[in-house]
Amino acid sequence: MQWIGNSLRRIWDSLFNVPTKLLSESSTNICDWFGKQTKALSLNWHNLPIMVLQRWQYLVNIGALGPEYARDGKLILQCLIASTSPALLEVVNRRFDRLAPEYKGPLTFYYLILSEMFMTNPAIAEELVAFL
């Protein structure tokens, strides 16, 4: 059973390590769209521009980063939904449902969970991360 945990961790780490800057969407090469720096969404959600996250989610959805990202993203989204409390899920779904379809996926869903839980103050999030 440990291999399942390791596999999910690998998927999570690869999918949720996101670029921090959008350079240009005009290039035909998606590698030119974003800056080189990436950060973990879990720890840096409050510093990442939502527009960058939405564009990255779009590329995941269309399989531009590889078919495994699109497949794994669907699995992670199901896990996120299943592990979210009904009250939080209701609030997050109200915001998630307003997104354009191309921007819906695990990255934006997770961002919305984090922003709902910790939006009041990023310092609270830092204290909780330190506690955990």
Image (tube, helix red, strand yellow):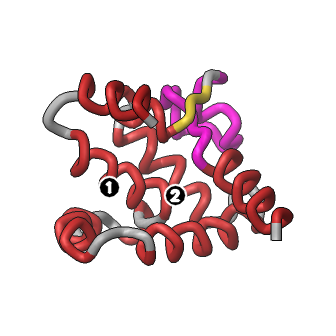
Name the foreground residue: 71 vs 76: 76
Q: Which residue is mark 1?
A: 113
The kind of residue on which mark 2 rests is Tyr
Q: Is residue 45 above or below residue 83?
A: above
Please identify the quadrant where the N terminus is shown.
bottom right
Question: What type of secondary structure mainly makes up the magenta span?
Answer: loop
Q: Is residue 127 above or below residue 18?
A: above
Q: Residue at x 78, y 68 (%)?
A: 4
The disc placed on residue 26 is none
Q: Which residue is mark 2?
A: 58
Q: Are marks 2 and 1 in contact (CB under 8 Å)?
A: no
- Disc 2 on helix, strand or loop? helix
Residue 23 drawn in magenta: yes
Q: Is residue 122 above or below residue 7?
A: above
The kind of residue on which mark 1 rests is Ile
The percent position of residue 97, horizontal first and vertical second, equals 26, 72
Q: Is residue 39 left or right of residue 115?
A: right
Calculate the distance from the C-alpha at mark 2 to the C-alpha at mark 1: 19 Å
Residue that extends furthest to the front in the rendered view of this protein = 131
